[in-house]
Image (cartoon, rainbow, N blue to C red):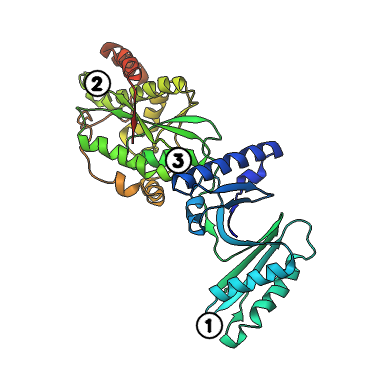
């Protein structure tokens, strides 16, 4: 029987009750994504230290590996736990995988109460594979084998496989609560959203629609960037939340101190996101800010930005430089989308302030009536299928 073994790391460190809850959450997410890919017969069972996926083809193991919480997935063949069955399947897999002149190693692992140990299997299975194949030049190499035969005997089954697909790790999506992402579609915000998804948060992408102060290409890019994350999100309906802030941006452009436009804009976005988070029972805001990367992200300005809201602002990319963030974007598949040139914001000043003063910013917000415009925008958020 074809079985995909799923291993996890961090979940195993939790207390028994939390571990069971996270395992169930992980199984649900895996099945959701597999069924969305068309594998409707997939099913999952839980064992000690492993989740077993059956009813899905072995080549879907790479899909399973991209589910948050999965440390690795192994496309395996399953048999019973008696030694003769284990040997028969191991030799069968070896004959299929090991070519003439290649080297091999057997890496067995026995978990639970069985009449043989891992060492017993290593010796017996190694001999069982070597003897009928030695005439083909097949030989043992324990340090750098061409083919590694992994054999796991655990619970009620034995599993043989030759590939271990590295997973994304982290915690199951949605197991740690909900966050609102300031999602612009640029390089940074999808990377930041992905990083918090990896930590188990459900992330609601909130796009600040600045039209007519940005072009249509800006809006299309954000939709494409969200689609780029879709393989990681176990949901049937991928949606973008959109806050119309064109009027707000127009008012900010009237600021008597143009250097503060970016800070006024960001504080307004924080307020809208905080109001939306309260409505959605989300516990924080996610941004893709990196310390010192642009004028609004200096430590002085970040201090002023945070003062605008009482909800936590999480910045998973805060200590990364641009190249490191680009590396994450390339890894998760959004870089090519986000790096496309678009018609950006026309309100950005030529020389934005790097050291805004809170008192002056507050005074300008009051003079321009920005708080009322933020309230209007937060009440006008729409849900757009992507």
Give SS at disc 3.
Answer: loop
Mark 1 surroundings: few (<14), some (14-19) or many (≥20) residues within 10 A: some
For the C terminus, which image quadrant?
A: top left
Q: Nearer the viewer, residue 292 or 284?
A: 284
Q: Quadrant of residue 176?
A: top right
Residue carrying label 3? 233
Spatial CA distance of label 3 from label 1 is 43 Å
Who comes first in sequence, dot 3 or dot 1? 1
Residue 221 position in % (x across, y down): 28, 40
Q: How many marks are shown on the rendered structure?
A: 3
Toward the front, the furthest residue is 41
The label nearer to you, 2 versus 3, is: 3
Vertical relation: 133 (above or below) 89: below
Q: Pointers 2 and 1 in contact (CB under 8 A)? A: no
Residue carrying label 1? 100
Q: Nearer the viewer, residue 84 or 29?
A: 84
Spatial CA distance of label 2 from label 3 is 35 Å
The residue depicted at 31 percent of the width and 34 percent of the height is: 295
Visible residue check, residue 206: yes
Q: Nearer the viewer, residue 29 or 314?
A: 29
For the N terminus, which image quadrant?
A: bottom right
Residue carrying label 2? 252
Who comes first in sequence, dot 2 or dot 3? 3
Disc sitting over residue 344 in the figure = none
Toward the bottom, the furthest residue is 135
The label nearer to you, 2 versus 1, is: 1
Q: Pointers 3 and 1 in contact (CB under 8 A)? A: no
Give SS at disc 2.
Answer: helix
Residue 164 position in % (x across, y down): 55, 60
Left or right of residue 322, residue 104 in this image: right
Residue 383 position in % (x across, y down): 35, 27
Spatial CA distance of label 2 from label 1 is 72 Å
């Amino acid at each position: 029987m074809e079985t995909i073994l799923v291993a996890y790391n961090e979940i195993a460190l939790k207390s028994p009750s939390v571990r069971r809850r996270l395992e169930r959450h992980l199984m649900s997410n895996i099945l959701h994504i597999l069924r969305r890919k068309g594998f409707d017969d997939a099913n999952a069972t839980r064992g000690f230290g492993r989740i077993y996926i059956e009813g899905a083809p072995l080549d879907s193991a790479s899909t399973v590996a991209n589910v948050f919480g999965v440390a690795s997935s192994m496309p395996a063949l399953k048999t019973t736990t008696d030694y003769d069955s284990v040997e028969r399947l191991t030799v069968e897999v070896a004959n299929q995988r090991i070519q003439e002149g290649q080297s091999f190693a057997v890496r067995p692992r026995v978990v639970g109460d069985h009449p043989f140990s891992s060492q017993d299997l290593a010796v017996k299975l190694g001999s069982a594979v070597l003897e009928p194949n030695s005439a083909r030049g097949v030989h043992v190499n324990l340090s750098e084998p061409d083919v590694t035969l992994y054999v796991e005997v655990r619970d009620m089954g034995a599993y043989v496989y030759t590939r271990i697909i590295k997973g994304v790790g982290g915690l199951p999506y949605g197991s740690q609560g909900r966050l609102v992402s300031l999602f612009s579609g640029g390089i940074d915000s999808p990377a930041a959203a992905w990083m918090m998804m990896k930590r188990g948060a459900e992330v609601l992408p909130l796009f600040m629609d600045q039209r007519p102060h940005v072009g249509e290409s800006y809006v299309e890019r954000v939709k494409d960037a969200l689609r780029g994350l879709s393989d990681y999100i176990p949901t049937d309906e991928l949606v973008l939340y959109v806050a119309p802030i064109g009027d707000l941006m127009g008012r900010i452009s009237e600021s008597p101190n143009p250097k503060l436009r970016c800070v006024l804009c960001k504080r307004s976005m924080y307020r809208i996101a905080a109001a939306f988070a309260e409505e959605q029972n989300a516990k924080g805001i996610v941004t893709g800010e990196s310390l010192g990367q642009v004028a609004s992200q200096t430590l002085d300005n970040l201090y002023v930005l945070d003062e605008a809201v009482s909800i936590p602002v999480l910045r998973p990319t805060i200590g990364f430089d641009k190249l490191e963030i680009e590396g994450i974007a390339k890894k998760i598949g959004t870089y090519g989308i986000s790096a496309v040139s678009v018609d950006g914001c026309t309100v950005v000043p030529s020389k934005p302030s790097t050291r805004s003063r809170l008192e002056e910013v507050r005074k300008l917000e009051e003079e321009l009536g920005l708080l009322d415009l933020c309230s209007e925008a937060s009440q006008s958020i729409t849900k757009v299928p992507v």
